[in-house]
């Protein structure tokens, strides 16, 4: 086996790449509990952004604001040139245009249990992209092949392991040819060993240049795979920058405390 | 009274009645369940007025005995210029009752579909309509099937109420045979057993359905 | 208004009929529920068959069997007695199933705890399990009672003077055929909806007080 050579990604992607995602002053409250306090964040094309932070920091909420699964109270969100200002009224069409470019993978997979694996991957292609069943199934099989699950096509999700279900969920999201992928703790419902299958697929995706935002508790993944690390606490981004830099020499005390807590476990 | 000679003599008339009963039950369910689905979807409408209106209709529909609904459609409506045959009135009345009851059953089923799947469909860009049609309704129906079968059994039993509007269903047939032969007990017991011969196996089906439901969910 | 007052005359009969049938069912359901769980050969089969037959035949048919069928031989079966007997019998079967549900909601731990204290099975059933079963059964029994209240309207077909009986009478007598039935529907809705709400509230409360 040849020695594994890390692709020199940083040189490949000069900072002049345009932004894929821009969040400007995104704020969200539940009642009088502020969950996001004017958060701004930019993600460049082809960049992998990892988001870490203590439980309840608002990571999931921020991620879900990107595709408006959660509607922010205020703030402006731009994904691949489609902009929605949460403060104004927007139409279902605006929302569809924005979501069109965004794929999402959930902690709990959320596969459709009444549809077999192939239908799970095909249904949105048919309904959203207007592909015929045949075209959709061809594309789905390619993707299932790619995540190593072509043999499961006719099975129902309940017959697949957690790791397999999550890989199917990734294929399902990729089937719509998104330009941005959002992951919310994709491995935390999985045994560590099974989680590796999923992380491997994600690494491959990153290497191919997919723009990704990953909320994760996998510090190893954040450190090795991400290009940009974001640390959140109490509804704000307390620190962000080069992952290696943040891990080895965090500026904020709060970051240091958090990293010590998770790394010394 | 001799069952061995009586019952074969009663059977043709009763079977004809049973046919009418089954027909009324099936038609009521066929019309009523889609109605129930519409009400169930409407009950989760975003418009408050629609929601209140639908919940009101459902509560009134469930609060009124099927017998009274039947009297309204058969004896009451002609006064306002709309006359229904006894068959028509029975089907419409039982379908209305079916819609009211099954809307609650289906609402429970639809709510049992995990929110995460609805979100996943949204994140995939599927419209609300498509999400309902392909994700929520198929699963909600599946969850509701045992209760729907249970309700179908009750509606089949409720067709006996159509005796009051002179529909020649099973009970009417039994009663009229009784009044000509003066052998009420024998013919009514036979009719009762004929109802039971359908409802009891059907109720076994309910528990079978419950077990099968566990698959793929 | 007169029509409404006339229809209201049927309310005591409807309620009386419902309560009597329910009382019969609450008592008769106990041996049926216990019989169903019995390990004595045949007992469980008989109990299950009785329950299935009682529930499998429509209420109105039971009333006809009792009133027209048995009534020719037994003259003391007037309409009211027949209706109470018929609805009562059906209630026994439904209440037995409700008790069964209640019994299965009580965990094994309760039996074990009782027996570990040195109580016999009989007294565990009477003093520990029984009271809890009744408690968990109340919500289901209440919704059954609401259904029974509506089902009691079939008694009109054998001439019991309850709500629908009066509504029917008024519909025939007055020029307004529709009104009396709407009013009777209103009376039922008024009686059942608050019961249904109370049941839901009660359900939530009682669940907290039963060991799980
Ligand atoms: N629907 C909701 N209603 C009320 N509060 C909510 C809701 N969703 C989230 N919150 C609150 O918002 C805060 C941030 O939640 P969020 O799920 O974004 O945190 P997180 O950083 O993803 O945490 P975790 O690592 O545990 O997933 C939490 O305090 C949570 O209790
Ligand atoms: Mg989270």
Image (cartoon, coloured by chain):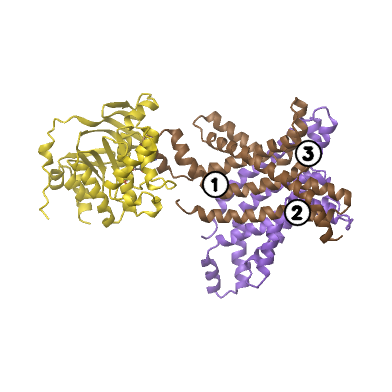
Chain colours: A yellow, B brown, C purple
Give the residue at mark 3.
B165
**Tally of marks:** 3
The picture quadrant where one finds residue A26 is top left
Q: Chain of mark 2?
A: B
Q: Secondary structure at mark 1?
A: helix
On the image, the x and y values in percent for residue B131 come to 44, 37
Q: Residues within 10 Å of mark 1 (few under 14, many from 20)?
A: many
Residue C7: horizontal and vertical position, in percent?
79, 37
Give me the chain letter of mark 1.
B
Q: CA distance from mark 3 to mark 1?
A: 32 Å
**CA gap, disc 2 to disc 3?**
19 Å
Looking at the image, is mark 2 or mark 3 earlier in the sequence?
Answer: 3
Q: Which residue is mark 2?
A: B192
Tell whether A225 sits left or right of B87. left
Label 2 environment density (alpha carbons within 10 Å; few <14, some 14–19, many ≥20): many
- The image shows residue B76, relative to residue C14, as above or below, that is above
Q: Which residue is mark 1?
A: B144
Give percent across and percent down for residue B80.
75, 25
SS for dot 2: helix
Q: Chain of mark 3?
A: B
* Number of other residues with Cα within 10 Å of mark 3, as a class: few under 14, some 14 to 19, many 20 or more: some
**Is the residue under label 1 in contact with that under label 3 (CB below 8 Å)?**
no
> Can you say whether B198 is above or below B32 in the image?
below
The residue under the point 63% across, 67% down is C126
> Residue, x 59% and y 54% (percent of image)?
B205
């Amino acid at each position: 086996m040849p020695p594994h050579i890390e692709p020199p990604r940083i040189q490949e992607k000069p900072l002049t790449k345009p932004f894929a995602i821009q969040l400007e002053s995104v704020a969200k409250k539940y009642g009088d509990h502020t969950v996001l306090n004017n958060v701004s964040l930019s993600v460049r094309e082809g960049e992998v952004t990892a988001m870490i932070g203590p439980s309840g920091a608002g990571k999931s909420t921020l991620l879900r604001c990107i595709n408006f699964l959660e509607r922010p109270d205020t703030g402006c969100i731009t994904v691949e040139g489609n902009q929605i200002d949460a403060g104004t009224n927007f139409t279902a069409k605006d929302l569809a245009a924005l979501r069109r470019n965004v794929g999402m993978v959930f902690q709990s997979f959320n596969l459709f249990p009444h549809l077999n694996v192939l239908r799970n991957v095909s249904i949105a292609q048919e309904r959203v992209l207007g592909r015929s069943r045949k075209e959709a199934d061809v594309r789905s099989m390619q993707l299932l092949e790619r995540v190593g699950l072509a043999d499961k096509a006719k099975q129902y999700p309940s017959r697949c392991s957690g790791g397999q279900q999550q890989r199917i969920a990734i294929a399902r999201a990729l089937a719509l040819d998104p330009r941005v992928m959002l992951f919310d703790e994709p491995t935390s419902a999985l045994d560590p060993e099974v989680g590796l299958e999923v992380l491997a697929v994600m690494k491959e995706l990153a290497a191919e240049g997919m723009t990704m935002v990953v909320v994760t508790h996998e510090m190893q993944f954040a450190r090795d795979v991400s290009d940009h690390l974001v640390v959140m606490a109490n509804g704000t981004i307390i620190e962000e920058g080069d992952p290696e830099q943040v891990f080895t020499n965090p500026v904020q005390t709060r970051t240091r405390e958090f990293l010590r807590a998770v790394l010394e476990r | 009274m001799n069952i061995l000679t009586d019952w074969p003599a009663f059977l043709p008339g009763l079977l004809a009645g049973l046919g009418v009963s089954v027909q009324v039950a099936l038609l009521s369910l066929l019309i009523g369940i889609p109605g129930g689905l519409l009400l169930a979807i409407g009950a989760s409408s975003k418009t408050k007025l629609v929601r209140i209106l639908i919940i009101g209709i459902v509560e009134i529909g469930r609060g009124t005995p099927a017998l009274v609904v039947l009297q309204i459609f058969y004896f009451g409506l002609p006064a306002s210029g709309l006359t229904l045959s006894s068959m028509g009135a029975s089907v419409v009345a039982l379908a209305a009752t079916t819609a009211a009851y099954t809307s609650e059953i289906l609402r429970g089923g639809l709510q049992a579909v995990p929110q995460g799947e609805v979100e996943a469909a949204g994140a995939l860009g599927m419209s609300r309509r498509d999400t309902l049609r392909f994700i929520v309704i198929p699963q909600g129906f599946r969850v509701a099937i045992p209760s729907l079968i249970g309700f179908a059994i009750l509606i089949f039993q409720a067709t006996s109420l159509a005796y009051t509007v002179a529909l020649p269903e099973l009970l009417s047939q039994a009663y009229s045979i009784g009044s000509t032969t003066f052998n009420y007990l024998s013919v009514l017991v036979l009719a009762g057993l004929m109802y039971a011969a359908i409802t009891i196996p059907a109720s076994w089906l309910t528990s079978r359905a419950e077990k099968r439901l566990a698959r793929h969910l | 208004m007169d029509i409404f007052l006339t229809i209201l005359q049927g309310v005591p009969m409807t309620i009386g009929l419902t309560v009597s049938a329910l009382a019969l069912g609450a008592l008769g359901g106990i041996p049926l529920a216990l019989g169903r769980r019995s390990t004595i050969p045949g007992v469980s089969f008989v109990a299950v068959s009785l329950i299935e037959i009682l529930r499998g035949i429509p209420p109105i048919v039971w009333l006809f069997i009792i009133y027209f069928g048995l009534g020719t031989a037994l003259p003391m079966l007037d309409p009211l007695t027949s209706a109470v007997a018929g609805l009562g019998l059906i209630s026994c079967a439904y209440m037995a199933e409700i008790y069964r549900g209640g019994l299965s909601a009580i965990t094994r731990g309760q039996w074990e705890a009782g027996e570990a204290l040195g109580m016999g099975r009989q007294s565990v059933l009477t003093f520990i399990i029984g009271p809890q079963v009744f408690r968990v059964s109340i919500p289901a029994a209440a919704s059954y009672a609401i259904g029974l209240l509506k089902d009691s309207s079939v008694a009109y077909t054998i001439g019991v003077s309850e709500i629908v009986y009066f509504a029917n009478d008024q519909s025939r007598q007055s020029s307004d055929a529709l009104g009396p039935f709407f009013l009777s529907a209103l009376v039922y809705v008024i009686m059942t909806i608050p019961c249904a709400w109370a049941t839901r509230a009660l359900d939530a409360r009682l669940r907290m007080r039963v060991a799980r």
